[in-house]
Amino acid sequence: MYLRTCATGPLSGSLTGSEVIRVAGALVLNATYEPLCVVTLRRAVVLVLAEKAFVVEAGSDVMHSARVAIPVPTVVRLAHYVRVPYRREVPLTRRAVLDRDGYACVYCGTRADTIDHVRPRSRGGQHVWTNVVAACARCNHRKGDRLLGELGWHLRVAPTQPPATVAVVMGWAKRDPAWERYLGLTPGADAAGEYAAPA
Ligand SMILES: [Zn+2]
């Protein structure tokens, strides 16, 4: 079930109705609200119509099938719990670091397109989430192989490893804001207003 539900690649399905193009996909939650994957809207609607999933969050758009109209889901929850074979960590890539830091240089706040090791690798710094930050090319160059203390620079926020749930949405260019609290990025992941498609 898990593999079948989550195996569809991003936007592989063709969507009907121009009104649904604005949201790229739907976040799929396990029965326990643990995020599993992102699927196309078409796939999410199929799951709901088959009563394999319930709509947890929906946008204002409505999708019509031959018999029913359902709100276009942004988050769905599986009706039955599925065992997750493993939970991979978010891979430490340049893009993932830039994404975590909002593409803003942690030193000056301008747009970042490079990553910097806070403690330089030449000074024993490790290539780990807690030592890698987004930086603009200018700050990166100015910093060179020096430590922050030697420059009088400081970090406003200590870099952290993103929760593993973020890996679920990696690779999706568009992320619906409604997904955030289910990914553990904002507190208060309580669900309200859950409804199934009419039979
Ligand atoms: Zn900078």
Image (tube, rainbow, N blue to C red):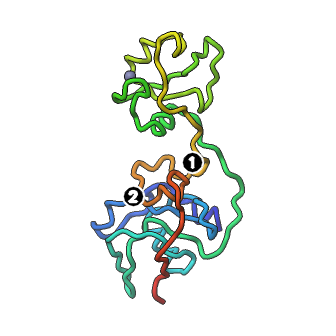
Across and down, in percent, residue 142 comes to 42, 11
Across and down, in percent, residue 69 comes to 37, 82
Which numbered dot is residue 24?
Answer: 2
Q: Which is closer to the viewer, label 1 or label 2?
A: 1
Tell me: 25 left or right of 158.
left
Mark 2 secondary-structure assignment: loop
What's the distance in space between the residues labelled 1 and 2, CA to CA? 17 Å
Q: Nearer the viewer, residue 58 or 188?
A: 188
Instruction: Reply above or below: 161 against 190.
Output: above
Query: Badge 1: how crowded within 10 Å, few (<14), some, or many (20+)?
Result: some
Residue in the picture at 44% in, 17% down = 140
Instruction: Reply above or below: 123 against 182.
Output: above
Does the beta carbon of the residue at mark 1 sit less than 8 Å from ligand 1? no
Across and down, in percent, residue 152 comes to 47, 14
Label whose residue precedes the other's in the sequence (1 or 2)? 2
Q: Nearer the viewer, residue 50 or 177?
A: 177
Residue in the picture at 54% in, 62% down = 189
Q: Which residue is mark 1?
A: 167
